[in-house]
Amino acid sequence: MYDIIIIGSGPSGLFASANIKNKKILLLEKNEILGKKLLVSGSGQCNLTHSGDIKDFFNHYGQKKNYVKKILLRFSNVDLIKYFNQRGLDFIVDENGKYFPKSLKSKDLMNVLIDEIYNNNVEIMLSKKVTKISKEKDFSVYCGEKKYIAKNVVIATGGKSYPVLGTTGDGYEFAETLGHKIISTKPSLTSLNIENFNYKELAGTSFKNAKISISNKLSNIGDLLITHKGFSGPCVLDFSRYIYDGDIIYISFLNLIKEKFSNILYNKLLENPKKDIFNILKDFDFTKKFLYFILNELKINYKELACNLNKKDRNAIVDYFIEKPFKVSTVNGFDSAMVTSGGIDTFEIDSKTMQSKLVEGLFFCGEIIDVDGDTGGYNIQFAFSTAKIISDFFNGGENN
């Protein structure tokens, strides 16, 4: 009989195992090693959180702001960095505010957690795929024919992203069997493939502060990248939770409203009548290759003088740069998505303890919950914060 069985050794499962004290704990992992997903996160560098006030985090979780803030305020980015600092790990912050281990090696962060787990005398079983969970008085956790009994179970199996690492959605089935509602899952933090995409020669071209939208109410601003098949970059990745195959998206290569760009362009044309349209548009910091391509698309001679540019062509330029429609052929799938959108309904999980409101002794943490954050360390922060809340519950409210 175990006090707690923790299923999964992703960021949240590891952090819960490292922080629950004085309990008989069994950690079950279906892979042959611990922390496979954490080891490869951030291309092996592990962007574990973001800089700034924790209140700045709340708007980086889509429509889950109110649920997430209760959790992050309990264990913030400052708390997380302090936790690892106290255990000898130093960090660097890049120009975008992302925190990485100073060594840029995720294994160094993993080693801190593994040391804590061993200090806690956690029993670890690798290559143990959980096939079923049931509950009568206590929980029965099955790995094939083998059964393990526990008073409490923590499901930390992750979502469906990167199934090659073992995150194949098993936890959703366990939760559903125990009575929980699963919000429909889809890939998030992933790139878009565009129908009849003819920008292949522009692959690698990037834009600062571009804008993507799917309606007048739903949009996102950030760095945009052209790929061989469509669009990527933080602007798209953070917005992909809202996009489905077949959607029409609108790309603004400049973060300006149409009327303002139209006025700016018109005034530039008036002020520089003998300047060609190519050099006028260069003032907006577009690459030469991109401008040549777009003007060719619009059938406008790049040497056309400002004084000769007619209203129709001027309006065509404004429409193209500010509100260019594209049809999404496919949103890239779970194989390349960094995180899963959807999961266990947050209305059924108590944010004060991360315990199920339906089944006493059942806890959830990390990506399995219907919360997905933007790129930049927000998802790993959420994973660690939910795990810390669970450990505080079992430690009698300690905040160590």
Image: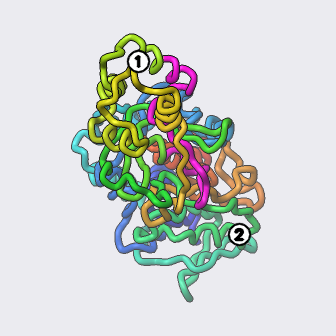
Q: Position of residue 283 (x, y in %)?
A: 33, 22
Residue 285 can be seen, yes or no: no
Instruction: Give the residue drawn at x 75%, y 74%.
Output: 136
Q: Position of residue 34 (x, y in %)?
A: 37, 65
Q: In the picture, residue 40 is in which quadrant?
A: bottom left
Q: Nearer the viewer, residue 270 or 59?
A: 270
In the image, which disc is placed on residue 176? 2
Question: What residue span does the magenta drawing correspond to?
Answer: 237-263
Left or right: residue 273 versus residue 353 is left
According to the image, label 1 marks what residue? 269
Which label sits in the foreground, 2 or 1? 1
- Amino acid type, label 1: Leu
The correct choice, above or below, for 142 with respect to 27 in the image is: below
Q: Position of residue 64 (x, y in %)?
A: 65, 42
**In this view, which residue lies farthest toward the bottom?**
145
- Amino acid type, label 2: Glu
Alpha carbons under labels 2 and 1: distance apart: 62 Å
Inspect the magenta stretch and tell me whether residue 335 lies in it: no
Dot 1, crowdedness within 10 Å: few (<14), some or many (≥20)?
A: many
Q: Secondary structure at mark 1?
A: helix
Question: What count of labels does the image hold?
Answer: 2
